[in-house]
Amino acid sequence: MEKISYIASAAATILGLCEPFNKKMKTVLVFSLMGNLLVGISYILTGGFSGAVICFTAAVQLLINYSYASKEKTLPKGWVWVHTAAFLAVNLITFRAWYDVLSLVAAMLFVVSVAQTNTKHYRLLYISNSGLWILYDTLAKAYANLITHVVLFVAIGIAIYIRDKKVSELKG
């Protein structure tokens, strides 16, 4: 099972490397959906039940957000509250260890990040989210996902530099 966990995490890493470099939130949402499903599977295989449920809840949120983005509509603020409540409920139900609170905080950052219409704001929130998942993975001993989140953290940092900092320097 551990080998399958590493394969799922590797696939999520590859998808995640593409995600932060996209200019359109609609595309970001698709990559994030596939990545969350794979990371969720990896958590199940390593016993990280809380992390898995958070990832699968995120997948549902991403499907809802994508349905609005694909029609070029803004996500109603009410959905942000629904997603927040869903993540809070899921985390309370699956809470096992003190560090599961990190997955809740990461989930709240995720709710806000994928509700963005501007990919620059998404990336800034996403890098904070990844930092929390790195800490969670370390404490939960979910090493396959730790590798994924460290690589994604670096990729997001590079994407912020290339897409946001460099572009703003060119405009300024």
Image (spheres, helix red, strand yellow):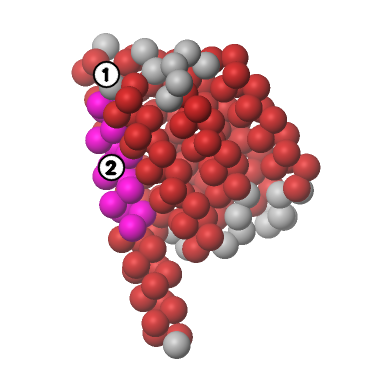
Q: Which residue is pictured at 50% across the width and 27% down the height?
A: 101
In magenta stretch: residue 153 = yes
- The part of the image, by quadrant, that contains residue 25 is bottom right
- Towards the viewer: 24 or 168: 168
Identify the residue position indicated by label 2 in the image.
Answer: 150
SS assignment for the magenta stretch, majority: helix
Q: Which residue is pictured at 28% across the width and 52% down the height?
A: 154
Q: Residue furthest bottom?
A: 172
Amino acid type shown at disc 1? Ile
- Towards the viewer: 153 or 68: 153
Q: Residues within 10 Å of mark 1 (few under 14, many from 20)?
A: some
Q: Which residue is pictured at 72% across the width and 55% down the height?
A: 73
Q: Is mark 2 on a helix, strand or loop?
A: helix
Q: Nearer the viewer, mark 2 or mark 1?
A: 2
* Relative height, residue 60 to residue 69 (above, below): above
Q: How crowded is mark 2: few (under 14 residues within 10 Å), some or many (20 or more)?
A: some
In this view of the protein, can residue 66 be seen by the observer?
no
Amino acid type shown at disc 2? Val
Magenta residue span: 142-157
Q: Is mark 1 on a helix, strand or loop?
A: helix
Residue 137 lies, in percent from the top left, at 33, 29
* Relative height, residue 71 to residue 130 (above, below): below
Identify the residue position indicated by label 1 in the image.
Answer: 4
- Which quadrant would the C terminus be assigned to in this image? bottom left
Give the alpha-carbon distance from disc 2 to disc 1, as whole Å: 19 Å
Mark toward the start of the polypeptide (2 vs 1): 1
On screen, residue 141 versus residue 164, left or right, reads: left
- Which quadrant would the N terminus be assigned to in this image? top left
Residue 19 lies, in percent from the top left, at 41, 50
Residue 6 lies, in percent from the top left, at 25, 25
In this view of the protein, can residue 165 be seen by the observer?
yes
- The part of the image, by quadrant, that contains residue 131 is top left
